[in-house]
Image: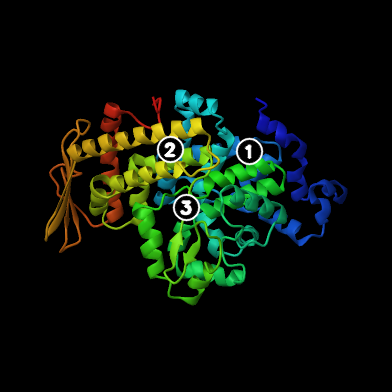
């Protein structure tokens, strides 16, 4: 089927072959424009397009649908239930990466699998392509192949730093600053432009937690490449930036703890202080001597919807599986924090702040604002019910000698219990995995997989009772 996106791409079918050196110099003039064929910037774009993470853009440049390609890149993982066997962008995915992709797909499902809700959004002027592309790009920075842009030298990594340090490409940088104007944020780069790229890379190697905080940035370079190759318009480029940037807020709960405590406590090294010195106020800025990173707010209708469903996923099945793999450590203690104690109350607090941020969002129309407020109220009520049901089925005890996690669900043939012994560091599973034999395991990852498999039954029972927010609910009605 020929879509609006396909039609916008057709005039640029030859770009892919140009960058693959399949056409002669005379065919390159339409791409190079005023930059000239010897432009250093053009040569960098050519090399960046050959990076493994640029596969979707290469296909789009050869006439494939860009938006469809983005979705297919992640959707292929959904049908492979083995956490170890899938590859994407040239490398085998870890359990943590695959869990991140499942979480990301919640944002797709919230729109694609809720037809009445999607129609209500479109009736209010919702930009489907901006939402799906921006959501796709927003968590690419959680994947190893994209995280390498922070630390490993490559042409795409060089282009990445050129952009986030405010040095180019000029065409994309100009539109980024227009987007920042629309967000009421200052026209400043993301990272200190006075630092050498080698110094910035070393800072990210020394302090990996920064890659987690800034994970929305690597996906932006795909939008930059697509825009530089004329696969998307300036309006589409800005719309994707709007959806991606600040999607992890509002600044409450874990996100506030990360940017206000964990990261500032480690800002002792000179490079780490320089990284954010006098730069972009919205999100990557250290105020005074406190080094408390400021994080901005969503700005458009699509960005608020993306942030809303990102938070809903965080507090439900997809978020639990993702965060448990991300933070590692004792899976029993994580289950207590993520399912019973901190995660859902923190998320509800974020949603309450998100509703307040709507009042200051200048790009939101009155009917859009009303619709979003109703949806947020519905979401909070859903999470409150979700939490109550979890507390009926998930039980945790902490003592001086052991931790105990017990799961009770009608969908489990019998109650499932895991006991962690502080002294031996081992886990005991009841009932045993092999009948009549004790199941004592030392591997946290083995236990994590086992608990996750049993929790899937718990989540299924909850969703059967109150529904799945990413599958078939007509919100906010």
Q: Can residue 20 be seen?
A: no
- Give the labeled residue for mark 1: 66
Question: Circles 2 and 1: CB distance less than 8 Å?
Answer: no
> How far apart, in angstroms, are the residues tagged by discs 1 and 3?
21 Å
For label 1, the crowd category at 10 Å Cα-Cα, with few meaning under 14, some 14 to 19 and many 20 or more, is many
- Give the labeled residue for mark 2: 106
- Give the labeled residue for mark 3: 142
Picture coordinates of residue 168, whole percent (x, y): 68, 59
Q: Residue at x 66, y 41 (%)?
A: 235
Q: Which residue is drawn at 19% across and 58% down?
A: 426
Quarter placement of the N terminus: top right
- In the foreground, 150 or 302: 302
> How far apart, in angstroms, are the residues tagged by discs 2 and 3?
15 Å
Q: In which quarter of the image is residue 330?
A: bottom left
Q: Which residue is drawn at 30% across and 34% down?
A: 381
Q: In this view, does 285 lie above or below 289?
A: above
For label 3, the crowd category at 10 Å Cα-Cα, with few meaning under 14, some 14 to 19 and many 20 or more, is many
> How far apart, in angstroms, are the residues tagged by discs 2 and 1?
20 Å
Q: In this view, does 401 lie above or below 130?
A: below
Picture coordinates of residue 45, whole percent (x, y): 70, 55
- In the foreground, 372 or 425: 372
Question: Circles 1 and 3: CB distance less than 8 Å?
Answer: no
Question: Judging from the image, what secondary structure is the residue with disc 1 in?
Answer: helix
Question: Judging from the image, what secondary structure is the residue with disc 2 in?
Answer: helix
Earlier-in-chain disc, 2 versus 1 = 1
For label 2, the crowd category at 10 Å Cα-Cα, with few meaning under 14, some 14 to 19 and many 20 or more, is many
**Residue 475 placement, left or right of 52:** left
Q: Which residue is drawn at 84% across and 46% down?
A: 27
Question: Circles 2 and 3: CB distance less than 8 Å?
Answer: no
Picture coordinates of residue 446, whole percent (x, y): 29, 51
């Amino acid at each position: 089927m020929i879509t609006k996106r396909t039609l916008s791409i057709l005039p640029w079918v030859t770009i892919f072959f140009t960058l693959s050196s399949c056409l002669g110099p005379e065919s390159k003039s339409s791409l190079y424009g005023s930059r000239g064929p010897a432009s250093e910037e053009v040569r960098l774009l050519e090399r960046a397009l050959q990076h493994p993470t640029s596969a979707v853009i290469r296909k789009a440049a050869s006439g494939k649908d860009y938006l469809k390609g983005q979705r297919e890149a992640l959707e292929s993982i959904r049908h492979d239930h083995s956490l170890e066997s899938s590859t994407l962008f040239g490398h085998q995915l870890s359990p943590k990466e695959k869990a991140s992709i499942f979480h990301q797909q919640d944002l797709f499902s919230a729109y694609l699998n809720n037809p009445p809700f999607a129609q209500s959004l479109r009736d209010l002027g919702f930009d489907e392509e901006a939402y799906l592309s921006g959501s796709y790009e927003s968590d690419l920075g959680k994947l190893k192949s994209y995280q390498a842009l922070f630390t490993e030298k490559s042409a795409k990594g060089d282009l990445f730093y050129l952009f986030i340090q405010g040095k180019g490409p000029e065409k994309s940088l100009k539109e980024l600053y227009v987007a920042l104007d629309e967000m009421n944020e200052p026209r400043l780069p993301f990272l200190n432009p006075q630092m050498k790229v080698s110094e910035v890379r070393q800072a990210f190697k020394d302090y990996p937690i920064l890659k987690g905080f800034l994970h929305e940035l690597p996906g932006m370079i795909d939008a930059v490449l697509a825009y530089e190759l004329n696969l998307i318009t300036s309006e589409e480029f800005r719309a994707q930036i709007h959806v991606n940037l600040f999607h992890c807020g509002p600044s409450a709960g874990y996100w506030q703890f990360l940017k206000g405590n964990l990261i500032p406590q480690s800002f002792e090294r000179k490079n780490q202080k320089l990284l954010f010195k006098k730069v972009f106020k919205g999100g990557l800025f250290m105020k005074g001597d406190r080094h408390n990173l400021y994080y901005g707010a969503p700005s458009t209708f699509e960005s608020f919807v993306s942030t809303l469903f990102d938070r809903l996923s965080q507090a439900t099945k997809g978020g639990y599986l993702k965060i448990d793999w991300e933070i590692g450590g004792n899976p029993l203690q994580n289950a207590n924090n993520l399912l019973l104690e901190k995660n859902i109350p923190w998320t509800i607090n974020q949603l309450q702040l998100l509703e307040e941020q709507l009042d200051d969002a200048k790009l939101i129309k009155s009917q859009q604002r009303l619709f979003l407020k109703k949806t947020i109220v519905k979401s909070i009520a859903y999470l409150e019910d979700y939490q109550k049901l979890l507390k009926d089925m998930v039980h945790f005890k902490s003592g001086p000698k052991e931790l105990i996690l017990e799961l009770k669900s009608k969908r489990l043939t019998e109650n499932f219990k895991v006991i962690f012994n502080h002294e031996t560091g081992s886990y005991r599973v009841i009932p045993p995995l092999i009948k009549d034999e004790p199941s004592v395991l030392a591997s946290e990852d083995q236990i994590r997989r086992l608990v996750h498999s049993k929790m899937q039954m718990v989540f299924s029972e909850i969703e059967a009772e109150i529904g799945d927010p990413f599958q078939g609910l007509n919100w906010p009605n």
